[in-house]
């Protein structure tokens, strides 16, 4: 095998979710692309890596010091949705059901992986709340063990703001899921977060 091809496969397979077989397909696809297209792609990746910033207000990715969401005057600045990663912001935005601000923690507390509360952007969140104007914090954290640990930790830290409304996203049985195949924690959350039935 060509060393150039092997090197390309090796680098591509370092990406999450990309095995050597997929890396080979990607490398061969790039080989069939026009050189200008490959140059434009690699330039965009290099520019992204070197020029991307983190919003000073919410820790979201941005081209400038303040992201588009935080600088949008039409957003409800009294509500902040706390998420783990930037990808979570994109997922929530795609629903078009939320018009508040976000706060990206940058992960979850995970002693096994050496991630402590101090490694996350929790103090930035607390500073934003302390500066005033925020009425509600929505904790949109995953239901993993690490997510639940982070949720508990955040809830305790937010106790210093007695007038702040703290909520979590609903957890439980997903639409189209069968109870038979759900785990005990999911069923427990579903029972705890039960809703009244509309009888009209």
Image (spheres, grey):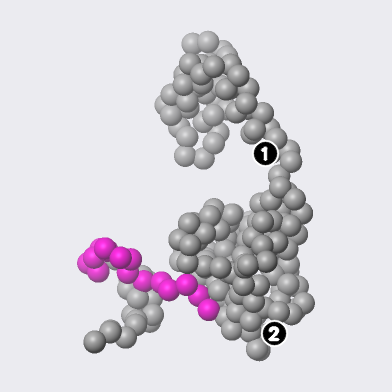
Q: In which quarter of the image is residue 177?
A: bottom left
- Find numbered disc 2 in the image and state the secondary structure of the residue it sits on: helix
Rendered image: mark on residue 160: 2
The one nearer the camera, 135 or 142, is 135
Q: Return the residue at label 1.
A: 48
**In the depicted structure, whether residue 69 falls above or below residue 132:** above
Task: List x then y, in percent, for residue 200.
Answer: 24, 87
Q: Is label 1 in a helix, a strand or a loop?
A: helix
What percent of the width, then of the height, locates residue 184?
33, 71
Q: Where is residue 28 in the image (x, y as percent from the top left)?
A: 47, 19
Pick out the residue farthest to the bottom. Answer: 162
Q: Which residue is drawn at 33% across and 66% down?
A: 174
Ranked by sequence position, the earlier of labels 1 and 2 is 1
Q: What residue appears at the point 66 percent right and 72 percent down from the top-left corner?
A: 77
Q: In this view, does 73 lie above or below 3?
A: below
Please say whether residue 19 is visible from this viewpoint.
Answer: yes
Instruction: Find the residue positioned furthest to the front.
Output: 74
Kindly give the residue lying farthest to the top in the view shown. 2
Which range is magenta?
A: 167-181
- The dominant secondary structure in magenta is loop
Residue at 69 percent across and 38 percent down: it is 49
Q: In this view, does 65 lie to the left or right of 68?
A: right
Q: Which of marks 1 and 2 is in front?
A: 1
Residue 88 in view of the camera: no
Crowdedness near tag 2: few (<14), some (14–19) or many (≥20) residues, C-alpha within 10 Å: few
């Amino acid at each position: 095998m060509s060393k150039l091809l092997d090197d390309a496969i090796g680098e591509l397979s370092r990406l999450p979710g990309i095995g050597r077989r997929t890396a080979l397909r990607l490398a061969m696809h790039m080989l069939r692309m026009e050189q200008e297209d490959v140059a434009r792609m690699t330039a965009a990746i290099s520019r992204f890596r070197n020029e991307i910033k983190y919003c000073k207000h919410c820790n979201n990715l941005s081209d400038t010091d303040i992201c588009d969401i935080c600088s949008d005057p039409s957003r409800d600045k009294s509500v902040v949705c706390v998420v783990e990663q930037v990808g979570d912001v994109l997922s929530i935005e795609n629903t078009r059901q939320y018009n508040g601000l976000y706060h990206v923690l940058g992960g979850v507390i995970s002693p096994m992986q050496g991630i402590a509360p101090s490694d996350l952007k929790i103090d930035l969140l607390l500073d934003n709340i302390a500066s005033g104007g925020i009425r509600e914090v929505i904790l949109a954290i995953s239901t993993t063990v690490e997510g639940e640990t982070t949720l508990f930790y955040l809830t305790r830290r937010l106790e210093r703001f007695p007038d702040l409304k703290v909520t979590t996203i609903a957890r439980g049985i997903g639409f189209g899921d069968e109870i038979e195949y759900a785990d005990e924690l999911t069923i427990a959350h579903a029972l705890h977060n039960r809703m009244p039935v509309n009888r009209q």
